Every structure is written in structure tokens, then in C-alpha cells.
Amino acid sequence: MKLTFKSIFISFLFNFIISFTYEIEFVSANPFSMKDIITNIDNLKEQSVSGILTLPEGKSNQKFPLIIAAAGSKDWSSHHIEYLKMYNEMGIATLELQSFKSRGETSTVGSQNTVTIPMIILDSYRAIDKLADHPNIDINRVALTGWSLGGGVTLFSAWKPIIDAINPQNSFAAHLALYPPCFAEPETLQFSDSPIHILIGELDQWVPAQACVELTDKLNKVGHNIGLTVYKDAHHSFDRNQDLIIAENAYNFTDCRFNLTDDGAVRMKFLNIPMTTPFMQKIGFSMCASRNPLFGGHKESRDLAFDFSKEFMYEHLLKE
């Protein structure tokens, strides 16, 4: 049989994917607090959430590792997308969670109560279960990453009481949290056995690096192997490609420390009052937080963070 250019081209298209992007939808919910998940998950009102799935170039029957990514309080920014493009070029699929857009929000800066860490944690697990049957996703090689608010999602999605309450069908093979809020110390220091690493700036005022030092020290003392990299002279969002500026009206949590009890309630450390509603959270924050933290790029730390992220994902998703 004579092969024409057209038949060869059609065969090529049939056998190969050329960097394919499309939207997926799944059902999540709107838990304000982790307590809503741990004590009331079956009664939460359903919320439709979407994500943008990008498959890298490869064969049409190929299964790719996947990185699910969660944005910060300002939603998606250009530096977040740079990471996702880097992962795609490595041969890793990415899912850009649209947790804000799905809920009609664009930012939570200054309030931190319209799209919360627990909401996006639930989104993340609903997303991984949704993609379990996708023909091009290797569900055993899925990592979670995020920045700031999304960093908190990445870190606390590995907390065992939350995992047990959600009871997902699938789990994350690795967690890479960039400048997460570490200032809520869990009563139960039990986390997933999957690799966890935190990247944060030494001078971060939005989410203090010292709180991450304290938390990882305690976790490692009880047998967890959680990594922490603190970048010298770097502020919040050090991996942005922009000058250092003031985040007007944003919270400065430098002096804040809270307790996270086993029922999922974040409590004021001095009064032990649960901050499980927007009103009580506002009161709790007012007791210790100030406003207007600095944030912005630090070239050396930015370069190191991109290099580390690439190596971390290669180690846990691609290395045989």
C-alpha cells in the first residue's frame, strides 16, 4: 500500500499529543474551616469547580505524571504560570485549579474569608479523584503545589485528620508548598508519609518564616521528614518578577500563632476561642496581625526556587 503524505500526517496526529489544554469540571463544596470538613463534610452544599488541564507533548496513549496547582490570595499570576510551563516542558501534566473563578472571586487579600484554604484542599482532592480515570494521567504520580494561600493548601492537605475526613480514593505523591501560612500549629502532629517541602523567604511578613521553622522542627522531632528552605533576604512572593512593594490592606501575620485542634478548628492561642466563622476569624486576626506587608521578587531566591522546584518534581514524579 502506497503511503501518502496525508496518511502519514494523519497517523502522526493519531499517535501523538501536541501540548493539549482544556477545562475539566468536578463537584466540591464550600467549607469555611477545616472543622466544616472534619465534622460536617456530608452536609456541605455542593460547589461546581473547574480546572485547566494541560497535557505535555507525547504519545496519545501515554500516561503522564500530574501536578495540581493552587494559586495565592491574588489568584493566578504570571510567575505561577511560569512554573506550570516549566513542568509541562519536563513532560508533566498540570491542572490549574480555578477555585476563585468558580466561586465568583478574584482576590481574598485583606479578608481571607471568601475562598479559604479548606475549600481549596477539598477542591484538590476532588480534582485528583476526578482525574483518576483519565487515560493520559498516571494517578500514582500526582503532586500538589501552591503559593501563599495555595501553599497552605499544599501543606495542610497532608494533615492526617483532613485526609481521613475527606477519605479520598487517591493520594498525593508529593507536596511542594511555597511560602505557606505555618502559624496554625496542629494539635495532632500527624502528616502524610509523602515527601513535603516548604520554600519561604527569611523576611516574609505576610506569612512568617519563623513559624515554618517552628512547625517543621516539631514535625521532624516526631518522625516526619519535612524539608524546609529559607531564602536569605527574601520577602513574600520572592519568585515574582517585580520590585518589592507594599501589599495594601493585606494582613501581616508576623506576630500571630494559632492552635489547630483535632476537630479542625483554628483557635486563638491566648483565649482558645475557635475562629470557625468569618466574624470570629476577623476578631482573632485583629488580636495579633497588622497590615501592609511587603512583597515582591528577589532574583537570587527566584532562580533558586525554580531550580529546586524542577529538581523536586523530577525526583518524585519522573525519576525511575
Image (cartoon, rainbow, N blue to C red):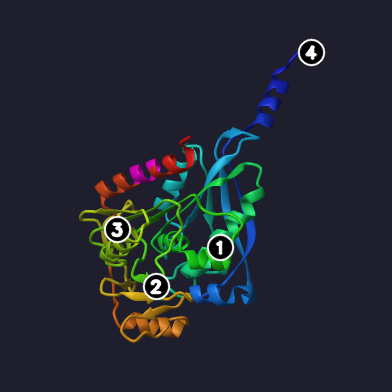
Q: Position of residue 88 (x, y in %)?
A: 49, 41
Say if mark 4 contacts mark 2, CB within 8 Å.
no
Res 112 → quadrant:
bottom left
Residue 93 % position (x, y): 54, 44
Q: Which residue is label 4 attached to?
A: 1
Q: Whole-percent x and y of residue 242?
A: 30, 54
Pointer 1: what residue?
123
CA separation, marks 3 and 2?
33 Å
| Left or right: 29, with 318 as reference point | right
Which residue sits furthest right? 1
Image quarter in which the N terminus is found: top right
Viewer-nearest residue: 51 or 134: 134
Pair 3/1: label in front: 1
- Say whether residue 285 is visible: yes
* Image point (62%, 51%), residue name: 131
Secondary structure beneath label 4: loop
Q: Which residue is mark 2?
A: 187
In this rendered view, identify the residue nearer to me: 64 or 107: 64
Indicate the amino acid at tag 3: Gly
